[in-house]
Amino acid sequence: MRFRAAASALALASLIALTTACDDTAGPSGKPAPPSAPDEAGATATPGAAPARLPDLVGMGLQSAQDKARSLGFHTLTSHDAFGRGRNQVLDRNWKVCSQKPRPGAHPTRTKIDLGAVKLEETCPAQDEGGTPTTASATMPDFTGKSVKVARRSLDSSTGLRVEDASPDGRIVLVESNWQVCTQDPAPGAPLNGRPVTLTVVKFDEACP
């Protein structure tokens, strides 16, 4: 009798423990709790994804604009050269904001903020030229007026590239974002087919000969 009573008590304890474990996933009503609702992008909502109001950052110093955006919860920040020369914003406080994407307004705080900027002593261009760079495919893009840095980025890494000073001085091109293309070979629209490319260039504050 004692053995049967002990066995019955053990079975009852096991049943209670199993029932408690099953109830861990239940909601207050005893029904299984529903999964987290996805947000508008289809991903499960996460802390910090709630909308916040992004102000107009144009005209601010780049460093101040980034600090302002971060203080409001926007932490995915990037910037680019609004002149389309591909210059890096090494010291943000030496640059100012000319454009921003997205526009001012309410946005999820995980939204990527892209700021077009120029140096403090420069005037913002009428239109941001620093959008998605051209990528050469089967034909040669038109690089006239663009920086050597942008041209190099646009070409396949296997392409042979020769850069020559268009002036008679024979200067060496060191900082490619400071030099603009005057002429190119092959011509714009010509088939590339693995052909090497030659660019003649001058500095941006100089006129092509």
Image (spheres, grey):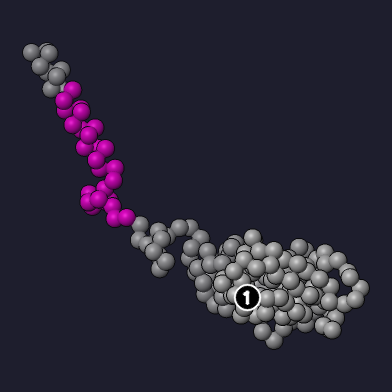
Q: Viewer-proximal residue, 100 or 89?
A: 89
Q: Which residue is located at x 88 percent, y 69 percent?
A: 171
Decide: few, some or many residues near mark 1? Use Cα within 10 Å; few <14, some 14-19, many ≥20.
Answer: many
Q: Which residue is located at x 84 percent, y 84 percent?
A: 209
What is the span of residues highlighted in magenta in the rendered image? 10-35
Dividing the picture into quarters, in which one does residue 12 lie? top left
Q: Is residue 89 visible?
A: no
Q: Which residue is located at x 51 percent, y 72 percent?
A: 107
Number of numbered discs: 1
Is residue 15 part of the magenta span, yes or no?
Answer: yes
Dividing the picture into quarters, in which one does residue 202 lie? bottom right
**Is 26 left, or right, of 7 in this rendering?**
right
Q: Main secondary structure of the magenta part?
A: helix
Q: Viewer-proximal residue, 9 or 169?
A: 169
Looking at the rendered image, the quarter that the N terminus falls into is top left
Is residue 142 part of the magenta span, yes or no?
Answer: no
Q: Is residue 161 visible?
A: yes
Percent x, y for residue 6?
Answer: 15, 17
Q: Which residue is located at x 80 percent, y 75 percent?
A: 201
Q: Which residue is mark 1?
A: 140
Q: Secondary structure at mark 1?
A: loop
Q: Residue furthest right?
A: 169
Percent x, y for residue 54?
Answer: 58, 73
**Is 149 left, or right, of 12 in this rendering?**
right
**Is 38 left, or right, of 47 in this rendering?**
left
Label 1 sits on what residue type?
Met
Q: Is 158 rendered above or below residue 141? A: above
Q: Viewer-proximal residue, 172 or 57?
A: 172
**Is 209 left, or right, of 24 in this rendering?**
right
Percent x, y for residue 37?
Answer: 35, 61
Dividing the picture into quarters, in which one does residue 191 lie? bottom right
